[in-house]
Image: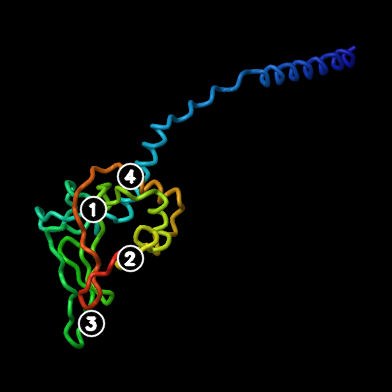
């Protein structure tokens, strides 16, 4: 008798388990998170670009400095506007014979003199006449990847570390560009770089 009861009970348990599993399978899935709006996606891209620009040290060279604390600090009112036009065009540094120090910079860290001549940090704000206002996203990506001004023109000179930045995925470079385009434009005409003998390097070279 006990054997018969056991044979009746075990299938019943199995049937209940199967019903429970089927009920769980039929329960509605949790609602999916709402898709991000275009505005949210754009904002996230800009914030990603801001972090990349800050973490990449772009303000070190591309932002003029203030010296209120004694040390040079990026001037937020002119952030990423490049070598100040008011600072003029310093000529290449000429080291004395036997002097190993050939690379020099100004206090803003926006003008650099070395064996290549003189380079000036570019205006990265979206000003149409003096910054990157007319640049396209692809031009910016090509400039970093190829080390060429506007992607096709003259060579980007030291100390710009484009050979390292070009290792970033295109999406990261596009985020940096989106952030730069979101900045307030600053009208500041940066001079052309100079050759070692002090002649301007034409944009078409």
Residue at the spot 82% in from the left edge and 14% down from the top edge: 9
The mark lying in front, picked from 4 and 3, is 4
60 left or right of 166? left
Q: In front: mark 4 or mark 1?
A: 1
Which quadrant would residue 82 be assigned to in this image?
bottom left
Quadrant position of the C terminus in the picture: bottom left
For the N terminus, which image quadrant?
top right
Say which residue label 1 marks.
Answer: 130
- Whether pointer 2 and pointer 1 mark residues with C-beta atoms closer than 8 Å, the reply is no
- Mark nearest the camera among 2 and 4 is 2
Mark drawn on residue 177: none
Front-most of 98 and 146?
146
Q: Is residue 152 left or right of residue 80?
A: right
Label disc, if present, on residue 100 of the rendered structure: 3
- Say which residue label 2 marks: 204
Reading the chain from its start, which is encountered first: label 4 or label 1?
1
- Of tags 2 and 1, the one toward the viewer is 2
Residue 116: image location, x then y, percent:
28, 74
Q: Quadrant of residue 73?
A: bottom left
At label 4, counting other C-alpha atoms closer than 10 Å, the crowd grade (few under 14, some 14-19, many 20 or more) is: many
Look at the picture and state if 18 lies above or below 118: above
Q: Residue 60: horizontal and vertical position, in percent?
A: 24, 58
> Which comes before the other along the chain, label 2 or label 1?
1
- Cα distance, mark 1 to mark 3? 36 Å
Label 4, on which residue? 179
Secondary structure under tag 1 reads loop
Alpha-carbon neighbours of circle 3 within 10 Å: few (<14), some, or many (≥20)? few
Check disc 1: other Cα within 10 Å, few if <14, some if 14-19, many if 20+: many
């Amino acid at each position: 008798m006990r054997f018969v009861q056991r044979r009746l009970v075990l299938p019943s348990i199995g049937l209940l388990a199967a019903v429970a599993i089927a009920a769980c399978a039929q329960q509605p899935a949790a609602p999916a998170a709402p898709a991000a709006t275009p505005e949210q996606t754009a904002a996230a891209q800009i914030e990603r670009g801001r972090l990349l620009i800050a973490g990449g040290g772009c303000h070190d060279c591309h932002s003029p400095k203030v010296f209120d604390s004694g040390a040079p600090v990026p001037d937020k009112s002119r952030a990423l506007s490049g070598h100040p036009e008011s600072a003029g065009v310093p000529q290449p540094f000429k080291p004395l014979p036997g002097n190993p120090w050939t690379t020099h910079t100004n206090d803003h860290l926006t003008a650099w003199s070395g064996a290549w001549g003189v380079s000036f940090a570019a205006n990265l704000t979206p000003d149409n006449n003096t910054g990157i206002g007319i640049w396209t996203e692809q031009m910016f990506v090509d400039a970093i990847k190829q080390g060429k001004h506007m992607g096709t023109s003259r060579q980007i000179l030291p100390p710009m570390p484009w050979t390292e930045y070009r290792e970033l995925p295109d999406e990261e470079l596009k985020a940096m560009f989106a952030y730069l385009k979101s900045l307030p434009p600053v009208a500041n005409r940066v001079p052309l770089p100079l050759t070692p003998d002090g002649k301007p390097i034409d944009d078409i070279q």
